[in-house]
Image (tube, rainbow, N blue to C red):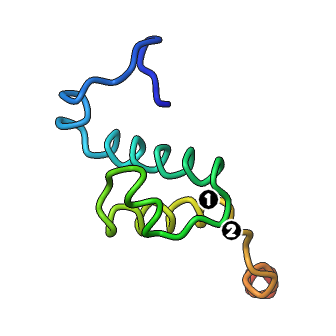
Amino acid sequence: MIKKNETDLTPEDLKNNRELTKLYNREKVRDFLEKNLGAKRKEVTHATGLSPNTVSRAIAAIRQEHRLPSPLTAFKKSSDDV
């Protein structure tokens, strides 16, 4: 859970800060998926109370965090330097 000065975020904090809201939702989805590996989006949506679009965006962001750069991208960058 996201904490701010050792206390939970208030709904007012989330309402006023879009980035905090995205981070909060992402962590909510991540926590559920860590405990329920292989869960479907519909299950995540139902369990977290988030909209399907929010869950999809959160999953995409989580995947992006863990995505490794493509070997072709690394090769292209090194060949451009020559």
Q: Nearer the viewer, residue 64 or 28?
A: 28
Q: Secondary structure at mark 2?
A: loop
10 Å neighbourhood of mark 1: few (<14), some, or many (≥20)? Answer: few
Residue 36 image offset from top left, x and y in percent: 63, 54
10 Å neighbourhood of mark 2: few (<14), some, or many (≥20)? Answer: few
Residue 65, which numbered label? 1
- What residue do we see at 72% from left, 83% from top? 73
Residue 67, which numbered label? 2
* Amino acid on which the number 2 mark rests in the picture: Arg
Q: Is residue 2 above or below residue 51?
A: above
Q: Nearer the viewer, residue 1 or 22?
A: 1
Q: Nearer the viewer, residue 26 or 44?
A: 44
Q: Secondary structure at mark 1?
A: helix
Q: Is residue 45 above or below residue 24?
A: below
Report how far apart the C-alphas of labels 2 and 1 lie in the structure.
Answer: 6 Å
**Residue 74 sits in quarter:** bottom right
Q: Is residue 41 above or below residue 34?
A: below
> Would residue 34 be found to the left or right of residue 16 on screen?
right
Q: Is residue 48 above or below residue 7?
A: below
- What residue do we see at 65% from left, 66% from top? 38
